[in-house]
């Protein structure tokens, strides 16, 4: 299938020879006799990966997960997930003699009495932040370029689950040291659980092994953090990768890059070196971050005490948005019969909202597919501008996220900007609804304008900046025709088809089944595609070229005249040409 | 399954035909032997540097002491900076070297692989369906509903085994959340040191963090509350004691004699999600929670005046004992801390 033979040559002039072919060959034969690896390897060793910087974002997530596994194992060798009270007598003098949980004491021990312990702690924490950030940016990349479309919808769902689990893994992880800050986080989590109707207090008592804080939560979170969630994460990452290999990577359209092929570099050796090298780069950068950027200095917070708190208490950044929702939520609660209390003020923003948001994100591919009715496979990526409504939808979701995230730091904003926290909160309450709508329409219009600009380029060429004055004294600007490679790349996209429902009623006036749904669908489809600018047709393109010829004819009499600079109008060979007079 | 669903979207020659893959352009390292050698030296140097950093890492491990001063050397800790710096650079050198190798020296011919549709072929599908049907028929699961249904029932019942043993994760809540250790006659003491408080000790506008005296008492030489038990009780019983101008206070009916000389006592645990509340605005009598900014007016019965908390701060009724120290006259009359479903169904206090 692949044309690998055309590249089976190296830069070397002599054929390379294995130093001891016999031993290596024998080992390979031994293994293949038992595992049959050659068949698998034959298919995959030269697997093609297309090149683009944005394909690297998911890789960052993958490699930081590996770093998390490595540094995490190191941490488990000293960390003790126990809430038994001990008196600290380690190296950190400011806390010596103070009662604390064994978890906190062992975190201090790791930081001050184990060489490299603080480094591993900081690398682990940074890697967690980079892991989640990279997953989110990767998710945005996949959405904006349409890489989630058939046949990759399930991989999108798996990816969304990875983000959800990664977030939970992060929360359980930073709760473990049992310092004042993380304890406050657990305290709030207890409040979240108690807000659940009917089962809230039971959930809390079961998780904490009794009343908050109890002595069970740290060991239980530890098991969840080092066994349960990482196990599921590993399995899902495996599935994510397998599907990636099975579907083959998407690619950007361009000359020779079609829906039926994938063009790029082979796994062995180029991608193995590049991706493998990139693992070391990510690992190395995280190492430098662990060395130079202090993160979560638990020794400064002191041991957890349910009667104390520090001002400016905030969770890790990825928990910021539900925390923001919690902050700007009006203080509603409902008292039902039998005096049961329904705490909307906690339940809605922290239990319902995140679940709802993740469900929406997971459903996005299916939603778009329903609106557009497009059931074809897609392997070529789309530029964000060529799917204005899709791009607008994600920017709207990003705006929603950003406003909530900002609300999660409303106290910091109030202090830094010297604003009233009340006014920031009222502003955010409105902005969280209005902002996404505005963002959607601005983004959509912006994309459509960019589509127009692309069409202008195709029809009229690039603006050269060369201004011609004709005999009548009129001015025109010369346009340089687009190189055919670029022009092809710009037009390598499908034409959008607005969904039109079949006639609503048959001849007897009976509504077709699902007519109402189809009507809704066509309305969405019009919003989705209706205003998009389609690429020029062949006729339009020829018309544009014809216009360019006219322009050339119009300027022909000027040919040979000493109009300096006109040689750069794109119709002349500019080898050895230069402006006769230098501008001062 | 219609053919249309299998279709791979294709871009036709519309309006421009695919000009095909551009010809391969050789890199400088492909044509210039000097540049090729130089790139080779660069890569080898990077790998060599990596080994050097590993050696430095080992040296740093033994040279730099760690201890209680994490701020030495630019505020980072010498051991941490040296170990992390060497590790990071050793890894980066390997990574950059490998990528440089791939970019400059390995073949940069792009190759083309053809895709296959994601779905199986129609023959495979038909065959699989037939196999499944054969299997189902041979098992007789359709013909023997008794077996099928009893098996489904047994599987469902087995689910109980997965859930029931989790029952002992914790005790049932009962009415534990509605009670604290406060009771009639218990002294309100300062949270640090456990000293009892006389009204005269406090100034107008002052806020003191308080705890029940029982946290500092001993029985047979052992503290009554210690370790986890102390944490559990503290999470409910922590209070703040404030002294305000008696004229500023507007108590609800029935609460007129809950204070002593303008001194009132409130739960310190936020009614939103349970953070201890600590930011006191003396002039306005407002108490602000640092977690989610719920604000309570302590002159007005702990009412919520801003933020996401839905419920006022529970107030602890105060009196003076024979020696003139502040005491509670009962437990809190309502549940403290975050709200919950059964909150108002059980009345607490006397």
Image (cartoon, coloured by chain):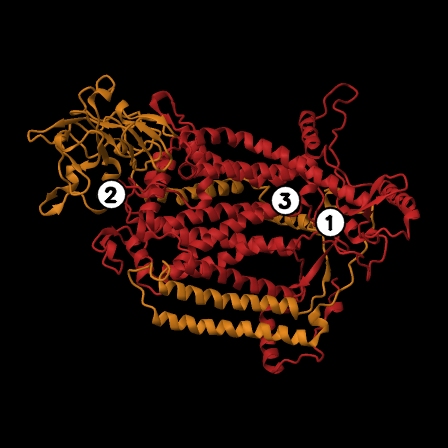
Chain colours: A red, B orange
Q: Earlier in the sequence, mark 1 or mark 2?
A: 1
Residue highlighted by disc 1: B122
Labels 3 & 1 near each other (Cβ < 8 A): no
Instruction: Determine the chain carrying the residue at label 1.
Output: B
Task: Name the chain letter of the residue that bears numbered label 2.
Answer: B
Residue B177 image offset from top left, x and y in percent: 27, 33
In three-dimensional space, the C-alpha distance between marks 1 and 2, rounded to whole angstroms, equals 66 Å
Q: Residue furthest left?
A: B322
3D distance between C-alphas at marks 3 and 1:
33 Å
Q: Chain of mark 3?
A: A
Classify B249 as above or below B113: above
Q: Residue at x 42, y 27 (%)?
A: A330
- Which residue is at 50% across, 55% downward? A234
- Decide: is A517 above or below A169: above
- Badge 2: how crowded within 10 Å, few (<14), some, or many (20+)? many
Mark 3, residue position: A144
Determine crowd level at label 3: few under 14, some 14-19, many 20+ residues with C-alpha closer than 10 A.
many
Whether residue A374 is visible to the viewer of this picture, yes or no, is no
Q: Give the residue at the far top of this rendering.
A: B253
Mark 1, secondary structure of its residue? helix
**Residue for badge 2:** B231
Quadrant (top left/top right/bottom left/bottom right) for the N terminus of chain A: bottom right
The disc at residue A376 is none
Answer with the quarter of the image where residue A31 lies: bottom right
Q: Are marks 2 and 3 on the same chain?
A: no
Residue closest to the eye, B251 or A473: A473
Residue A428 vs residue A206, the one in the foreground: A428
Element marked by disc 2: helix
Mark 1 neighbour class, 10 Å CA radius: few under 14, some 14 to 19, many 20 or more: few
């Amino acid at each position: 299938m692949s044309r690998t033979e055309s590249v089976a040559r190296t830069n070397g002039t002599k054929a390379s020879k294995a130093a001891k072919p016999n031993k290596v060959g024998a080992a390979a034969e031994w293994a293949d006799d038992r595992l049959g690896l050659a068949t698998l390897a034959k298919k995959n060793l030269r697997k093609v990966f297309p090149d683009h910087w944005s394909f690297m974002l998911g890789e960052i997530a993958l490699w930081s997960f590996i770093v998390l596994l490595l540094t995490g194992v190191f941490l488990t060798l000293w960390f003790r997930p126990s809430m038994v009270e001990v008196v600290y007598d380690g190296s950190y003098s400011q806390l010596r003699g103070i009662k604390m949980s064994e978890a906190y004491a062992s975190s201090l021990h790791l930081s001050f009495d184990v060489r490299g312990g603080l480094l591993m702690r900081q690398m682990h924490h940074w890697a967690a932040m980079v892991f989640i950030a990279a997953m989110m940016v990767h998710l945005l990349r996949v959405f904006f370029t349409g890489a989630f479309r058939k046949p990759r919808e399930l991989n999108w769902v798996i990816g969304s689950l990875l983000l959800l689990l990664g977030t939970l893994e992060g929360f359980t992880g930073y709760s473990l040291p049992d310092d004042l800050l993380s304890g406050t986080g657990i305290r709030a989590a207890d409040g979240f659980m108690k807000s659940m109707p009917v089962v809230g207090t039971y959930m809390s008592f079961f998780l904490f092994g009794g009343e908050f804080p109890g002595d069970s939560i740290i060991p239980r979170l530890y098991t969840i953090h080092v066994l349960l969630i990482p196990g599921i994460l590993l399995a899902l990452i495996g599935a994510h990768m397998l599907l990636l290999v099975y579907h083959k990577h998407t690619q950007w359209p361009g000359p020779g890059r079609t829906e039926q092929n994938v063009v790029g570099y082979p796994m062995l050796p180029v991608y193995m070196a590049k991706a493998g090298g990139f693992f070391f780069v990510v690992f190395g950068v995280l190492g430098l971050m662990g060395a130079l950027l202090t993160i979560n200095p638990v020794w400064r917070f002191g041991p957890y005490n349910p009667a104390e708190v520090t001002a400016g208490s905030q969770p890790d950044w990825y928990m910021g948005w539900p925390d923001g929702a919690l902050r700007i939520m009006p203080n509603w609660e409902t008292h039902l019969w039998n005096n049961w209390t329904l705490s909307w003020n906690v339940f809605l923003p922290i239990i319902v909202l995140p679940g709802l948001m993740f469900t929406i994100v997971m459903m996005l591919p299916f939603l778009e597919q329903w609106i557009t009715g497009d059931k074809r496979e897609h392997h070529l990526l789309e530029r964000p501008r060529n799917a204005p409504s899709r791009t607008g939808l994600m920017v709207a979701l990003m705006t929603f996220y950003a406003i909530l995230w900002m609300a999660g730091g409303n106290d910091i904003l109030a202090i830094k900007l010297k604003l009233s926290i009340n006014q920031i909160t009222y502003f955010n309450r409105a902005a969280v609804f209005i902002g996404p709508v505005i963002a959607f329409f601005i983004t959509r219009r912006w994309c459509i304008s960019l589509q127009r600009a692309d069409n202008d380029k195709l029809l009229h060429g690039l603006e050269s900046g060369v201004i011609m004055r004709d005999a009548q004294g009129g001015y025109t600007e010369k346009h340089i025709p687009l190189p055919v490679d670029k022009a092809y790349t710009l037009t390598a996209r499908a034409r959008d088809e607005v969904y039109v429902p079949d006639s609503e009623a048959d001849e007897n006036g009976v509504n077709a089944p699902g007519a109402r749904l189809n009507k809704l669908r066509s309305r969405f489809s019009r919003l989705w595609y209706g205003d998009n600018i389609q690429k020029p047709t062949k006729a339009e393109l020829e018309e544009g070229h014809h216009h360019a010829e006219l322009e050339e004819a119009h300027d022909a009499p000027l040919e040979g005249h000493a109009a300096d600079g006109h040689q750069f109008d794109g119709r002349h060979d500019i080898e050895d040409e230069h402006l006769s007079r230098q501008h001062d | 399954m219609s053919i249309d669903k299998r279709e791979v979207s294709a871009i036709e020659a519309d309006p421009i035909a695919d000009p095909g893959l551009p010809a391969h352009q050789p890199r400088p390292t492909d044509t210039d032997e000097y540049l090729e050698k130089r790139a080779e030296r660069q890569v080898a140097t990077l790998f060599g540097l990596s080994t050097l950093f590993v050696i430095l890492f080992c040296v740093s491990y033994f040279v730099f002491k760690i201890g209680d001063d994490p701020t030495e050397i630019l505020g980072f800790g010498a051991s941490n900076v040296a170990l992390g710096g060497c590790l990071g650079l050793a890894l980066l050198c390997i990574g950059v070297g490998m990528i440089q190798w791939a970019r400059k020296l390995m073949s940069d011919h792009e190759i083309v692989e053809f895709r296959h549709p994601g779905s199986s072929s129609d023959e495979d599908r038909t065959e699989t369906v037939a196999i499944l049907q054969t299997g189902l028929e041979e098992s007789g699961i359709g013909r023997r509903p008794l077996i099928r249904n009893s098996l489904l029932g047994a599987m469902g019942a087995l689910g109980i085994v997965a859930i029931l043993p989790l029952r002992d994760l914790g005790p049932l809540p009962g009415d534990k959340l509605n009670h604290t250790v406060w009771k009639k006659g218990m002294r309100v003491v300062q949270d640090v040191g456990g000293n009892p408080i006389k009204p005269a000790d406090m100034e107008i506008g002052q806020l003191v963090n308080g705890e029940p005296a029982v946290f500092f008492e001993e029985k047979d030489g052992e503290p009554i509350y210690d370790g986890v038990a102390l944490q559990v009780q503290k999470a409910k019983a922590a209070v703040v004691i404030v002294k305000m101008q008696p004229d500023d206070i507007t108590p609800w009916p029935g609460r007129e004699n809950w204070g002593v000389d303008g001194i009132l006592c409130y739960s310190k645990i936020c009614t939103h999600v349970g953070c201890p509340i600590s930011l006191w605005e003396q002039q306005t009598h407002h108490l602000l929670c640092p977690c989610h900014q719920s604000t309570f007016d302590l002159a007005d019965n702990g009412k919520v005046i801003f933020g996401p908390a839905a419920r006022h701060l529970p107030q602890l009724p105060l009196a003076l004992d024979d020696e003139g120290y502040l005491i509670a006259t009962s437990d809190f009359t309502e549940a403290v801390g975050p709200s919950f479903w059964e909150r108002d169904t059980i009345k607490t206090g006397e």
